Image (cartoon, rainbow, N blue to C red):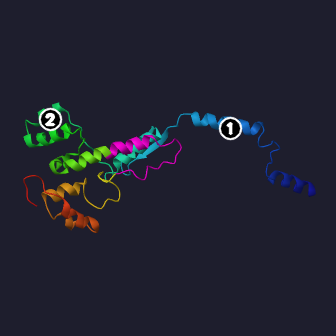
Amino acid sequence: SAQIARQRRKLLAPAVSTTPASGPTSAMALRIGCRRLADKVPDVFVQFGLEQQFRFISHPGVMTVSKLLEMRHMVRMRATFTQENIEKMKAFDPELARKAQVAYDNKLPVNFQQLELIDEALPRLVDEKKQLAEARAATMKLPVGGPYELPKNLDTSAVRPVPGQKDILGTPLETMEAFYPGETAKLLDGPAKVAQATIPAPSGEKK
């Protein structure tokens, strides 16, 4: 009937607010929005692993850092030696202790594979440390809410490993090529296959 049709149109019609945009409703929405911006970031439910899954609840920042640490092609664990560590190393490997002393004297956190080549890689590692410090300082200056873009003139030429790099510096292949010249050529394709020839042999060894 006509009455049923009118009621159906009323139910399906979009709700129209009669309050002006600059009225109380707009001000109330603005207050609620500002209050939400000041709220603490809520924890999130995180799951890691495929076959052996484990789950936990944590801050989204913790989840992001944890995920980055799992990306071995982007992040490598590094040791920061103390003098006490080095003295204990001298008892079983004096040469390794000497190389650790080089890292300690230059205040360099170093991966144990790179520690084997620290005499040759020292200039790059020192430059890398300076560039990373500048990158961290630039990151801390980024405005809250973005845009999250680092300065285009930021120099990261000595930082390794990095996504898209054209060499094997700072990767496990660097150590492999230094001790077993030519072996990486069997594994690599493209520009990296040519770059491996530039890796110097460790001190006292011939390539």
Tell me how far mark 2 sits from mark 1, CA to CA.
59 Å
- Three-letter residue code for mark 1: Leu
Q: Is residue 206 visible?
A: yes
Circle nearer the N terminus (2, 1): 1
**Tag 2 residue:** 86
Q: What residue appears at the point 21 percent right and 39 percent down from the top-left corner?
A: 106
Q: Tell me the quarter of the picture where residue 196 sits.
A: bottom left
SS under mark 2? helix
Q: What residue appears at the point 64 percent right and 38 percent down from the top-left corner?
A: 33
Q: What residue appears at the point 17 percent right and 47 percent down from the top-left corner?
A: 118
Percent position of residue 25, x then y: 75, 38
Crowding near pointer 2: few (<14 within 10 Å), some, many (20+)? Answer: some
Residue 106 is labelled as none
Crowding near pointer 1: few (<14 within 10 Å), some, many (20+)? Answer: few
Percent position of residue 69, x then y: 34, 46
Closest to the observer, 142 or 174: 142
- Three-letter residue code for mark 2: Ile
Query: For the magenta stretch, what is the residue range?
Result: 131-155
Q: Residue furthest bottom?
A: 190
Q: Quadrant of the C terminus?
A: bottom left
Percent position of residue 84, x then y: 16, 30
Closest to the observer, 51 or 143: 143
Q: Is residue 103 above or below residue 206?
A: above
Prevalent SS, magenta region: loop
**Tag 1 residue:** 30
Left or right: where 64 falls relative to 106: right
Left or right: where 31 falls relative to 63: right
SS under mark 1? helix
Left or right: where 87 falls relative to 50: left
Q: What residue appears at the point 23 percent right and 46 percent down from the top-left corner?
A: 111
How many marks overall?
2
Q: Residue furthest right?
A: 2
